[in-house]
C-alpha cells in the first residue's frame, strides 16, 4: 500500500520534502520507538499529503521555495498545493484515553504512539493514531481567501464524517496540510512513552456521506454586485 510521507525540519519550515513509501515501511519507522530529547524539535515533523511537484508550479512563484544554498526548489507548505491525503492522522490531547481509542478502533489497521506531553500532568493522555487509507482522499479544490470551499476537495466534504469516526480529537487533525512531530519523549517520561500497532480493515472512506461545503451562491452574489 503506497503512502505519501512529507517532512519538514521545524514548524517554521515551508519547504516540503516528499518521500515515497509503503504503509509497512512507515509503520515500522514509527514502531522503532521514541527519540529521547528535552525538546520536540529534536525530531522532524511529518504529514501524509500528496503535494504538487515543484515542476508543476513553475508558473506560480508564490507556491514554491527556492533554497539558494542548495539551488533546489521545493513545494511550499500550502493547503492549495495539496492534491490528496493518503493517511488519516488523529491527534488526541485528553479527549479520549488510550484504552478508549484502542477499543474504538479495534477493527482497523493503524499504528499509534504517545506524544511529547503525554501524562505530563500525570493524568492527561496524549497520543496520535495513523490509519492507512484504502484510497487517497482528494484535497484538490478552489478556496476563497477565507478558506471557504468554492469547488472540489472531497477531503473538505468528508470532514464531518471524519469527525464522527474520530471522536474527541484535536480539530487540527482535519487540516489536510497539518504536520505532526514524529515520536519523541523527554527522558523523565520515557517509561510512559508507548508505540503500538493494530491489524484490521484498512480505512475506506469512499462510500462515506459527504457534506456540501461549496459556496457558489455567495460567489455569484459578489460577482453580480461588483
Image (cartoon, rainbow, N blue to C red):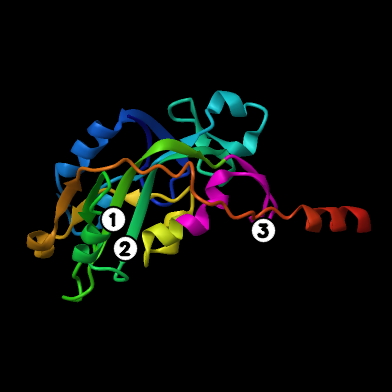
Q: From the image, state whether disc 2 or disc 3 is nearer to you.
A: 2
Which element carries disc 1, helix, strand or loop? strand
The numbered mark, 1 or 2, whose residue comes first in the sequence reads 2
The numbered mark, 1 or 3, whose residue comes first in the sequence reads 1
Q: Quadrant of residue 194?
A: bottom left
Tell me the magenta residue range. Answer: 140-161
Q: Is residue 156 magenta?
A: yes
Mark 1 highlights which residue? 128
* Quadrant location of the N terminus in the rendered image: top left
Of residues 67 and 61, the one drawn nearer to the viewer in this rendering: 61
The numbered mark, 2 or 3, whose residue comes first in the sequence reads 2
Mark 2 highlights which residue? 92
Mark 3 highlights which residue? 146
Left or right of 45? Residue 77 is right
Question: Disc 1 versus disc 3: distance between alpha carbons?
Answer: 28 Å
Of residues 49 and 199, the one drawn nearer to the viewer in this rendering: 199
At which x and y percent is residue 43? 26, 47
Q: Is residue 119 above or below residue 20?
A: below
Residue reaching furthest left? 191
Q: Is residue 226 visible?
A: no
Residue drawn 20% across and 76% down? 121
Q: Is residue 58 above or below residue 214?
A: above
Residue drawn 41% across and 34% down? 17
Which element carries disc 2, helix, strand or loop? strand
* Quadrant location of the C terminus in the rendered image: bottom right
The reply to whether dot 1 and dot 3 touch (C-beta < 8 Å) is no
Amino acid at each position: 500500500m503506497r503512502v505519501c510521507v512529507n517532512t519538514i525540519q521545524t514548524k517554521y519550515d515551508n519547504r516540503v520534502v516528499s518521500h515515497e513509501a509503503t504503509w509497512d515501511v512507515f509503520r515500522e519507522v514509527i514502531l522503532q520507538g521514541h527519540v529521547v530529547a528535552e525538546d520536540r524539535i529534536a525530531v522532524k515533523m511529518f504529514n501524509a499529503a500528496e503535494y504538487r511537484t515543484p515542476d508543476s508550479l513553475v508558473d506560480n512563484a508564490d507556491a514554491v521555495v527556492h533554497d539558494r544554498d542548495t539551488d533546489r526548489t521545493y513545494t511550499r507548505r500550502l493547503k492549495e498545493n495539496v492534491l490528496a491525503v493518503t493517511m488519516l492522522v488523529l491527534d488526541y490531547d485528553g479527549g479520549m484515553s488510550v484504552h478508549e481509542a484502542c477499543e474504538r478502533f479495534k477493527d482497523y489497521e493503524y499504528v499509534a504512539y504517545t506524544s511529547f506531553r503525554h501524562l505530563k500532568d500525570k493524568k492527561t493522555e496524549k497520543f496520535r493514531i495513523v490509519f492507512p487509507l484504502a484510497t487517497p482522499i482528494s484535497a484538490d479544490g478552489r478556496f476563497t481567501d477565507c478558506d471557504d470551499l468554492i469547488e472540489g476537495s472531497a477531503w473538505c466534504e468528508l470532514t464531518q464524517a471524519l469527525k464522527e469516526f474520530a471522536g474527541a480529537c484535536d480539530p487540527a487533525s482535519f487540516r489536510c496540510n497539518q504536520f505532526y512531530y514524529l515520536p519523541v519523549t523527554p527522558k523523565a517520561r520515557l517509561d510512559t512513552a508507548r508505540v503500538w500497532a493494530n491489524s484490521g480493515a484498512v480505512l475506506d472512506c469512499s462510500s462515506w456521506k459527504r457534506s456540501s461545503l461549496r459556496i457558489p451562491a455567495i460567489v455569484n452574489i459578489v460577482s453580480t454586485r461588483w
